[in-house]
Image (cartoon, rainbow, N blue to C red):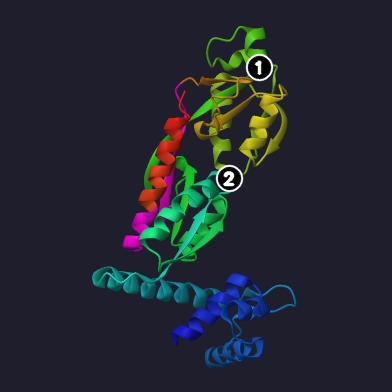
Amino acid sequence: MDLKQIEYIVKIAEEENITHAAEKLFITQSALNQQLLKLEKELGTPLFYRSRTDWHPTPAGEIYLNAAREILSIKKDAYDKIHDLSKIQRGKITLGFTPGRGIAMFTNAYPKFHSVCPNIEVEPIERSVRDQHPLLLSGQLDLGFMTLTKSQQKSGITYETLAVEEMILAVPTKLVTALDMKDGDLSLLREEPFVLTQKTSTIRDIVDSIFNDAGFTPNVLFETSNNYAIISMIHENICCGILPMYYMDPSDKAITYFALPNHPSWEIVAAYRKGHYISRPARALIELAGEYFTNTIMEHSI
């Protein structure tokens, strides 16, 4: 297998389009297509189903891509080990993180990282937790920063816990006064509207479990992927919500926060494919992310 050819075929699969792949590889579409046709002739079978808008692998293509990604992963691990041994700062880290707090972490950590590792290229990619998992397993992500519970972790991936974060109950202060709420007793809010995160989010499993333990199904006004939208609705006295502690704003007197019974929590983790070598620069990124998440949770604790 020719390594350059392998990289070309993997890029076509990633972009799902030969034109876009050629642009990313800085070669002509014709040159890339010739490489693909040459390989398909050698193998005696097509590797992609082709259309104008979508290229996706055939069964033979899937076999080739699985092997190709493994080869590229081995190459990257070897190069990272050699660079660490020789103390040469070279290479690239493809970094996944969730929208929202993931972006905040990256913009906080990257300037510090760049000051000590100026020659390391970092490619940031925003993805949900569920979308990061297959990218980590396929080698398209080197590192992923995510929030999840132990039960949501996947085999084949190593998770390093950076912080443990509790869920909190957020209630409009006017409603707290009207109900004379003293603690996070959800039963008092049985008839009140809630805005919740979408069912596809990892936090939703925890939220549903909290309501199940409380013995009722919440009155859901609407669902959103944005925790700041929930905070905004609570501030406007429209609903209640259950959120990670990170999103708590103690300075907002229109909202009162309560700890929940049994202190439900999840973990903020750095994730990478099991067996994947973590270079010194990647380790530095993990440590900077850990500092950020630990400090912000402490700042927002009840």
Considering only vertical position in the picture, is 69 above or below 133?
below
User: Is disc 1 surrounded by few (<14), some (14 to 19) or many (20+) residues within 10 Å?
Assistant: some
Q: Is residue 238 magenta?
A: no
* SS at badge 1: loop
The outermost residue toward the left is 85
Residue at position x 50%, y 56% from top?
96
Is residue 10 depicted above or below 275 in this figure? Answer: below
Mark closest to the chain's N terminus, 1 or 2: 2
Bounds of the magenta segment: 262-285
* Residue designated by label 2: 100
* Residue 38 point in image, percent of width and height: 57, 93
- Measured in 3D between alpha carbons, the distance from the residue under mark 1 to the one under mark 2, in whole angstroms, is 29 Å
* Residue 204 vertical placement versus 264 (above, below): below
The answer to whether residue 156 is seen in the rendering is no
Amino acid type, label 2: Gly
Residue placed under numbered mark 1 in the picture: 190
The location of residue 261, given as percent across then percent down, is: 48, 19
Q: Name which residue lies at 65% across and 32% down.
A: 230
Is residue 251 depicted above or below 148 in this figure?
above
Residue 33 visible in the shown view: yes
**Rendered residue at 60%/86% (across/down):** 32
Query: Hey, what amino acid is under mark 1?
Result: Arg
Q: Position of residue 265 (x, y in %)?
A: 46, 32
* Residue 274: in magenta span: yes
Count of numbered tags: 2
**Which quadrant of the rendered structure holds the N terminus?**
bottom left
Few, some or many C-alpha atoms within 10 Å of disc 2 (few <14, some 14-19, many ≥20)? Answer: few
- The residue sitting at 36% across, 73% down in the picture is 74
Q: Nearer the viewer, mark 1 or mark 2?
A: 2
> Do the residues bearing badges 1 and 2 touch, measured as CB atoms within 8 Å?
no
Q: Residue 104: horizontal and vertical position, in percent? A: 53, 46
